[in-house]
Image (tube, coloured by chain):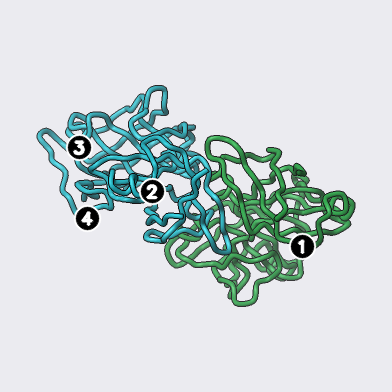
Chain colours: A cyan, B green
Amino acid sequence: MHKVTAGVSNRHLHVSQEDLENLFGEGYELTPVKDLGQPGQYAAEETVTLKGPKGTIDRVRVLGPIRSKTQVELSRTDSFVLGINPPVRDSGDIEGSEGLTLIGPKGEVELEKGVILAKRHIHLHTSDAEKMDLQDKDLVKVDIEGERGVLFKEVLVRVKDSYAAEFHIDTDEANAAGVKNGDQVTIIKD
Amino acid sequence: MHKVTAGVSNRHLHVSQEDLENLFGEGYELTPVKDLGQPGQYAAEETVTLKGPKGTIDRVRVLGPIRSKTQVELSRTDSFVLGINPPVRDSGDIEGSEGLTLIGPKGEVELEKGVILAKRHIHLHTSDAEKMDLQDKDLVKVDIEGERGVLFKEVLVRVKDSYAAEFHIDTDEANAAGVKNGDQVTIIKD
């Protein structure tokens, strides 16, 4: 049994340079304010408003660095507030996903796709994966103890030399299971 | 293996007659609009606003009938919006739980306790429990299949002649596991 650190993802978005400029102005660059668990990833100072057919959510954090495509990651609870129905997807798999409107200080972007509920997953450095005898794209379970204990099934393993070991879940999943950022959780292989 | 129907509880409150009158006026009575899964329980027309130190939530449904003590049942997500920290509790176990302010059309109530996150539980009629070989206060697990599959541990069994078989979870738990009202889920005994 191997332990891994939990990282709880609040709603956030990754942006393309084109969408960043449409939202914040020509030639705009993100302002990093806090490093995240994965090397090179950071929370930016910039936030946007999300607008759906039923409601809006303000001050949604942009994460850097810039990506080739804009991607918004929400909880199901958030999606009900906005009135949209995003699919559960691996990061980057946005074909046929949901859309919404992004509102920044200098403009709006009508996203036709890119809104997802992130599939729960574990990031592992290649050396971690070897120690744990796990491979990229394996599905494992993660056990959470405590008064809201659950066994998360359908947990995708993602392995890269640029990753640090971390179990990523959204706020619905964390709140349902009583998990907090930094908790140590247990990987269970089938 | 026994199946049971899932019932997803959105944020709601049960009120005492005294608090009802403080919120809606002297001699006020609840107006039933929809029967719930448990016999005799109903959603009322009446809603209140919840106010905590960090935020408010409008249009929170009152469930009837009247109870001896007011009890507010939230998700952890709701509690972050309000800025309070309610404990996970069985219904009725409100000593030392959280407080907040209830706002109705005719007045406000400062609740010193009564705000909880409901512990996930299964209601069973006595005859259901006999068939399943379960007893009041047993702890079981509930298995959810699908792309967000989880095994819920720490599920409290509650048995009464006035209950109908139903697995009750809050919106965080339902959203985390992809469960919808009316889904059939599987009880797993230890």
Q: Position of residue A63 (x, y in %)?
A: 26, 44
Q: Residues within 10 Å of mark 4 (few under 14, many from 20)?
A: few
Cα distance between the residues tagged 1 and 2: 55 Å
Type of residue at label 1? Ile
Residue B130, labelled with which disc? Answer: none
Which residue is tagged 1? B66
Image mark 2: chain: A
Which residue is tagged 4? A34
Residue B57 visible within the image: no
Compared with A104, B116 (above or below) is below
Cα distance between the residues tagged 2 and 3: 32 Å
> In the shown orientation, is residue A167 left or right of residue B6?
left
Type of residue at label 2? Met
- Which residue is located at x 38 percent, y 33 percent? A115
Cα distance between the residues tagged 3 and 4: 15 Å
Q: Position of residue B44 (x, y in %)?
A: 72, 51
Cα distance between the residues tagged 1 and 4: 49 Å
> In the shown orientation, is residue B152 left or right of residue B1?
left
Image quadrant of residue B120? bottom right
Cα distance between the residues tagged 1 and 3: 55 Å
Q: Residues within 10 Å of mark 1 (few under 14, many from 20)?
A: some
Residue A66, labelled with which disc? Answer: 3
Which residue is tagged 2? A132
